[in-house]
Amino acid sequence: MTIPAAILTAASLCADCFAVSLCSSVTLKDLRRTTVLKVALSFAVIQAGLLWAGWAFGSLVASLVIRISHILGFLLLLYVGGSMLWSGIKGEEEVRDLGAWRGIILGGIATSIDAFAVGVSQSISGESFSEFIPLLVSVFVITALSAILGICGGRAIGKKTGRTALIIGGCVLIGIGISLLFRPIS
């Protein structure tokens, strides 16, 4: 894969990561560098790790992953977005806390299932590991940057709009999950 293609693919893979970071961070009270770094690196490791795992498993699980990846993504985003929406309606402060490992891992996996499928397709197409490295590095870097931008942006939005941002963010994540159900299966 060429470097420009790797960067474009990485950018498209991390769009969901940006949305989850943005929507989930509206309730963060303290925006510490360690929290931002923890979330960004965790999302990047999960995204790049699932991309690599998909490449490594290749044709062994290709048909299964392609058939169910949209359902898994939908269910995870429905859970995260539904929790946000419910918390916003009820007026609860605590939601998918990106300061806690559970929220980070759920968000990271929900946004990275498509990376696994892309890894599988790269493996099936016969791409060697050395050809795969530019995509792997691009996914890691761009995912980390998108998480940082999403967290900082979500925190700023959350300070101004409070519960409304939580409700809108939950709806956005549920919408992304529903859109996964309508993606064509290759």
Image (cartoon, rainbow, N blue to C red):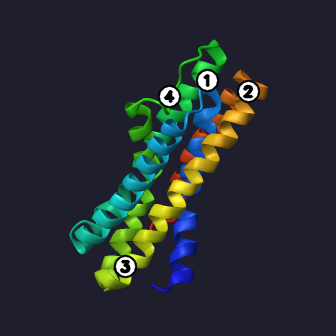
Distance from disc 2 to disc 3, alpha carbons, whole Å, reads 41 Å
Q: Mark 4 sits on what residue?
A: 97
Q: Is residue 5 left or right of residue 73?
A: right
Picture quadrant of residue 32: top right
- Say the numbered circle drawn on residue 5: none
Where disc 4 sits, the SS reads: loop
Which numbered disc, 3 or 1, marks the residue that appears first in the sequence? 1
1 and 4 marks in contact (CB < 8 Å): no
Q: x and y percent of residue 140 in the render? A: 45, 62
- The residue at 65%/31% (across/down) is 26
Q: Which residue is mark 2?
A: 159
Tell me the element at label 2. helix
Name the residue tied to disc 3.
132
Query: Mark 3 is on which residue type?
Result: Phe
Q: Earlier in the sequence, mark 1 or mark 4?
A: 1
Q: Quadrant of the N terminus?
A: bottom left
Callout 2 touching callout 1 (CB < 8 Å): no
Figure label count: 4
Which circle's residue, 2 or 3, is located before the other in the chain? 3
Which comes before the other along the chain, label 4 or label 3? Answer: 4
